[in-house]
Image: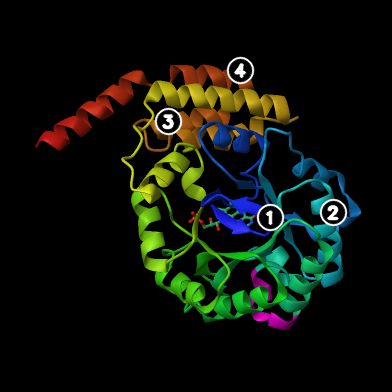
């Protein structure tokens, strides 16, 4: 656990991901051991105006705790006002986005653009820390806009610390890199060495081994999972075991995978007025490493109803799976 103000942040957390970390995703992840999640980023302007879409994006239920909200924006006053709302809504933590590479956000001066605007970033941090009373404020950022040395992030992290921000999370890529190349854990170390507040490392953690490497190389206090957990809610326990030096939990077999997918479908239907679109992506995530998934993905994509999707999941290949496993075993023996 990482102590932040009166709040204990678990060492392994799920990152905010637009169109991915919705309520059904979080509930499934929690059922498999996820200890802390973020909502996807919300625009501070939209939250202050309480647009219908934003209120919907922030919908949660009591079982969906502990939970952090993330704000994106570039106006200190509006960010402060939005952060106060986040606190009043009962979230456990408010995070500020200094990593989003999306042009719509960057062009307005928000997200990763703030890495280049330390004076504005400072005003935002100060306004938000002033605006919330109880909950911790954190900042999630990239290494830099185009400079991958970690210097830009280190400078922003020091400013954040001086303003009273409780912790920073660093994704080991630049804005220019987008999601290409690999996350640089050495550069995250530079940020870690330049501040006293906790640093959470992020980027390319897909199993226990990569989590251990991130912690060893960067010296980070916590590990943030991103894309690796999409369709793999078993990752949280695997990473926690690795960080604790415990043996890995057994991986799920196909039957367990299908059981969890069926539950995910159920939750999507329960909490989403239009579940078919999101489910097209979600279901394929779960089977991405299985033989025969390309054809399956096509079928899921063409499915028009949730019932059709359920049937496809039920029928998804025990035989292909067994064939794949036999091949793996043969390869292992040879
Ligand atoms: C589809 C998608 C949506 C994302 N949305 C957000 C977001 O809303 N806020 C944020 O700070 N980062 C967002 N990210 C970045 C991730 O939180 C994470 O920092 C990044 O994917 C690196 O971690 P990973 O390599 O483990 O995936 C998003 C990434 C992806 C792929």
Marks 4/2: CA–CA distance: 39 Å
Circles 4 and 2: CB distance less than 8 Å? no
Which tag is nearer the camera, tag 1 or tag 3? 1
Marks 4/3: CA–CA distance: 18 Å
Query: Residue 332 is drawn in which quadrant?
Result: top left
Q: Height in image: 86 above or below 173?
A: above
Measuring 40% from the left and 72% from the top, which residue is drawn there?
186
Q: Which mark is residue 85?
A: 2
Q: Which mark is residue 307?
A: 4
Which region is colored magenta? 112-119
Which tag is nearer the camera, tag 2 or tag 1? 1
Q: Height in image: 191 above or below 260?
A: below
| 127 lies left or right of 318 | right
Q: Earlier in the sequence, mark 1 or mark 4?
A: 1
Circles 2 and 3: CB distance less than 8 Å? no
Q: Which mark is residue 295?
A: 3
Tag 1's secondary structure?
A: loop
Q: Earlier in the sequence, mark 2 or mark 3?
A: 2
């Amino acid at each position: 656990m990482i102590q932040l103000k009166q709040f204990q942040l678990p060492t392994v957390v799920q990152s905010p991901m637009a169109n991915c970390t919705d309520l059904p995703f979080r509930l499934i992840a929690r059922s498999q051991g996820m200890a802390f999640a973020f909502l996807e980023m919300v625009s501070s302007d939209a939250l202050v105006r309480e647009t219908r879409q934003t209120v919907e994006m922030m919908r949660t239920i009591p079982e969906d705790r502990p939970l952090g909200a993330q704000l994106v924006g570039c106006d200190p006053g509006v960010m402060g006002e939005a952060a106060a709302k986040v606190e009043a809504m009962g979230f456990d933590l408010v995070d500020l986005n200094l990593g989003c590479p999306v042009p719509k956000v960057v062009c307005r001066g928000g997200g990763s653009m703030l890495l280049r605007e330390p004076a504005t970033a400072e005003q935002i941090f100060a306004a938000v820390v002033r605006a919330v009373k109880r909950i911790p404020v954190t900042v999630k950022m990239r290494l830099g806009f185009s400079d991958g040395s970690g210097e830009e992030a280190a400078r922003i992290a020091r400013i954040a610390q001086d303003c009273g921000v409780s912790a920073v999370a660093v994704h080991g890529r630049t804005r220019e890199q987008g999601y290409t190349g690999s996350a640089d854990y050495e550069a995250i170390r530079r940020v870690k060495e330049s501040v006293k507040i906790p640093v959470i490392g992020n980027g390319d953690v897909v199993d226990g081994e990569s989590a251990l490497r991130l912690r060893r190389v960067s010296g980070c206090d916590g590990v943030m999972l991103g894309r690796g957990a999409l369709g793999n809610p078993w990752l949280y326990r695997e990473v926690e075991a690795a960080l604790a030096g415990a043996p890995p939990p057994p991986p799920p077999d196909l039957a367990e995978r299908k059981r969890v997918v069926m539950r995910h479908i159920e939750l999507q239907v329960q909490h989403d007025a239009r579940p078919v679109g999101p489910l097209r992506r979600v279901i394929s995530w779960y089977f991405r490493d299985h033989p025969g998934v390309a054809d399956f993905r096509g079928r899921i994509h063409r499915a028009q109803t949730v019932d059709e999707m359920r049937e496809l999941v039920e029928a998804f290949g025990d035989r292909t799976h067994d064939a794949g496993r036999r091949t793996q075993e043969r390869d292992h023996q040879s």
